[in-house]
Image: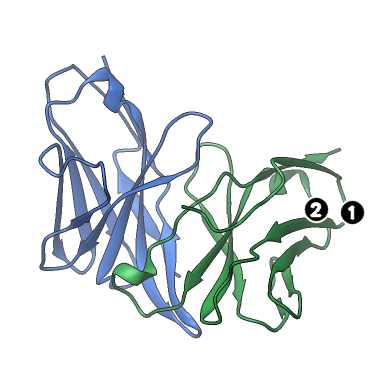
Amino acid sequence: DAKTTQPPSMDCAEGRAANLPCNHSTISGNEYVYWYRQIHSQGPQYIIHGLKNNETNEMASLIITEDRKSSTLILPHATLRDTAVYYCIVRVASYGGATNKLIFGTGTLLAVQP
Amino acid sequence: GAVVSQHPSRVICKSGTSVKIECRSLDFQATTMFWYRQFPKQSLMLMATSNEGSKATYEQGVEKDKFLINHASLTLSTLTVTSAHPEDSSFYICSASVRLAGGGEQYFGPGTRLTVT
């Protein structure tokens, strides 16, 4: 079962920052927070992951609370192409093998409005 | 980098026939590949984990004799849906595991839409 809770849907105006929350109150000390997104009828796309420090890459920023029970994915300047279902997943990091599997929850449908 | 392809992208078959779906890692070697299934308006459901050179590990409730998985090389895994029925119609997605700093990572193929008539 998924270990995260996300709102089912959110709206965001084009050009504004999109902040997607995720609760993972039962996260273990060795579990990372991963974010993927799925644009309609495509395979999921990796966005970012982190353990306890905030992370940033060319796609997004990930803010993890100090107690690690929740996190926020930030898309700094949302575009219409960012409309997708965003999945927050917690998982033990590994270098391949069965423990690398991802269990998807229901995610958040982000609709970027023009 | 880290591109995963699937073939075919769409397939329509008649009930009772078998369909093979290929998953390839194009620019890296993947010792582990995963197969997911997604029904309309639902999330991805993991079907099985495919390790190169060994038998696949199936998730609970997935029939291994119906969904045959072969991972013969480090760049190719195949999923064969045997004796397909209309209820097998779904979006099938594979992913390949890549080693990255901080842990292994998965990159997904574009998916294969199977329609069984």
Q: Quadrant of residue B54?
A: bottom left
Rendered view: A76 above or below A94: above
Can you say whether A113 is above or below A94 in the image?
Answer: above
Q: Position of residue A33 (x, y in %)?
A: 59, 70
Give neighbour class at mark 1: few <14, some 14-19, many 20+ (Cα, 10 Å): some
Give residue B112's position: percent from left, percent from top: 35, 38
Say which amino acid is labelled 1: Arg
From the viewer's perspective, tell me whether residue B16 is left or right of residue B90: left
Residue type indicated by callout 2: Ala
Residue at horizontal 45 percent and vertical 78 percent from the top: A93
Label at residue A78: 2
Pointer 1 indicates a residue of which chain? A
Element marked by disc 2 = loop
Whether tag 2 and tag 1 are in contact, CB under 8 A, the answer is yes
Q: Which mark is residue A16?
A: 1
Q: Tag 1's secondary structure?
A: loop
- Between the C-alphas of marks 2 and 1, the distance is 6 Å
Residue sitting at x 10%, y 40%: B65
The chain assigned the colour green in the figure is: A
Task: Write the residue at 27% across / 51% down.
Answer: B59
Residue located at (72% from left, 67% from top): A71
Give the chain ID for the blue colour: B
**Residue B9 vertical position relative to residue A14 in the rendered view, above or below:** above
Q: Are marks 2 and 1 on the same chain?
A: yes
